[in-house]
Image: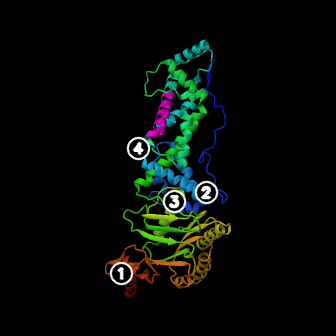
Amino acid sequence: MLRAATNGGPATPALDGDAAAAPPNPTDDHLVIDEHTWKDLEVFQARGAGRSIHDLLYRTKTAGGAKVLHRRMMRPWSSAHRIREVQESVRYIIAHRPAFDCLPSEVVAHGVSGYLDGGLPVVASTNLLVALIEAITIRLEWRFYMLITQGVLRTSKLIRGLRHILDSSRFPSPVPGELGVLLEEMRGLVSRKAFEGTPVMESWDLPMRTIFTLDRGFRRQEEEALRRLLRLAYQVDALVAMADATTSLGMVIPEVLEGPAAVEADALVNLFIAHPVPVSVRLDRCRSMLFLTGPNMAGKSTLLRSLGSALYLAHLGMGVPAARFRFTPCQSLVTALNISDDIHGGVSFFRAEAIRMKAIVESMNAGRRVVALVDEPFKGTNVKDAMEASWLVLESFANASDCLFAVSSHLIELGDALLATDRVVCSRFEAVERDEGLDFDYTLRAGVSSQRLGMRVLEQEGLVAQLRGRAGHRGSE
């Protein structure tokens, strides 16, 4: 009797990333990161017509690989061990990149998936005569037979490609990290008896008996193994995309540190700036806060985003845009870079700032190792309140245990007080004043900026001249 292929069999063991992404919690190995931080760092969605971090990493060959990559990006690691496992895999792929060209294309992967899910009839009987009748019946249904043939050929191509990747002569040493685990399981699956007759070359002229024999093996005997192979291939596809992004963007694999919170970045740049000026940042338990000052447009916000993006990529286990990068993994990455009011929700700008500061403090109070990046806190109120609120928060941050902070501010008066805590690094950006306007070199310097260039910017934009001209016009009336 003819039957459609079933989806029965043992439950497929879960691969990390198979399940839908869930918000991480501090009891697992994943970094706690919220929606506001995703937006601040432009991880999944860029502002305006720019590109997001996801856009830069989107290099997978398959839609399944893209989904795995997205899930990885939703749940970066906070465990040094797990981060190193990904790093080892990325390094290995970079060193043996041609071997992974045989990963299935989207056409093959989608074709195999559709073949397994298509409900096509299958020769199910073990009785030779009944099986022959079933085969002839299917063969007479030209459409079914062509779909089965196409599915068999694409599945065979999948298995050949994976075997080519697994050829031990292509990998002269044991494969490390996550990749080694994935390939080892893949090796066991492709060696199943039902796959032994897989043709070594693609041909549409396979005998009918061969087609049905392979189809029976693929869909009746080893359907779950094939589904598992696809999931494994998607995982490898995502790792290859991370390796390719690391290479093409000229990024360096960070050194993962043990012990107290620390980050050291040499020649750190921003991925989204065409000709960036490198900066260097060092924070540790002795100097746990970076306090940035300088005029508008000088580079403060860009540095904060560059540092946040680098830390995010480092927790994914891939390269970062720097000449050298060392870090101790944190448990929570929190930013307050772009804050806005909410008219419909009745939330003023200052209250929105307070809510965001509260999110940072709550993450610290939860016992997590936090890295927080804050751009010009409390600018939504008067100067006196801004000074008091900023000092209250920043002093607490500076004295926090095993957490790191980078904060920009125009309240340069806070610099001396923060320096007195002996836990703050004060750095500044400067502008060179010329007759034709302001010139920014985006170079990070030690100390607190004393520049006050607000009126000069208004003059440069021609606003002062227009206002004076208007006043003179009104005076002559």
Q: CA distance from mark 3 to mark 4?
A: 25 Å
Residue 450 in view here: yes
Question: What residue sits right under mark 4 in the picture?
Answer: 98
Q: Earlier in the sequence, mark 3 or mark 1?
A: 3
Q: Amino acid at mark 3?
A: Ala
Q: Nearer the viewer, mark 2 or mark 4?
A: 4
Lateral position of residue 141 relative to residue 359, left or right: left
Residue type, numbered disc 1:
Glu
Q: Earlier in the sequence, mark 2 or mark 1?
A: 2
Circle 1 is placed at which residue position?
A: 433
Image location of residue 214, percent across then percent down:
53, 24
Q: Earlier in the sequence, mark 4 or mark 1?
A: 4
Name the residue at the front extreme.
Answer: 173
Dominant secondary structure of the residues highlighted in magenta in the image: helix
Secondary structure at badge 2 equals loop
| Few, some or many residues within 10 Å of mark 1 (<14, 14–19, 20+) | few
What is the x, y in percent for residue 443? 40, 74
- Report, in whole angstroms, how far the alpha carbon at label 2 lies from the one at label 1: 47 Å
Magenta stretch bounds: 150-169
Q: Quadrant of residue 77?
A: bottom right
Rendering quarter of residue 382:
bottom right
Q: CA distance from mark 2 to mark 4?
A: 31 Å
Side (left or right) of 365 relative to 474? right
Circle 2 is placed at which residue position?
30
Tell me the CA gap for discs 3 and 1: 38 Å
Give neighbour class at mark 4: few <14, some 14-19, many 20+ (Cα, 10 Å): few
Most extreme residue toward the bottom, as rendered?
Answer: 475
Residue 408 pos. (x, y %)? 51, 75
* Residue 314: image tag: 3
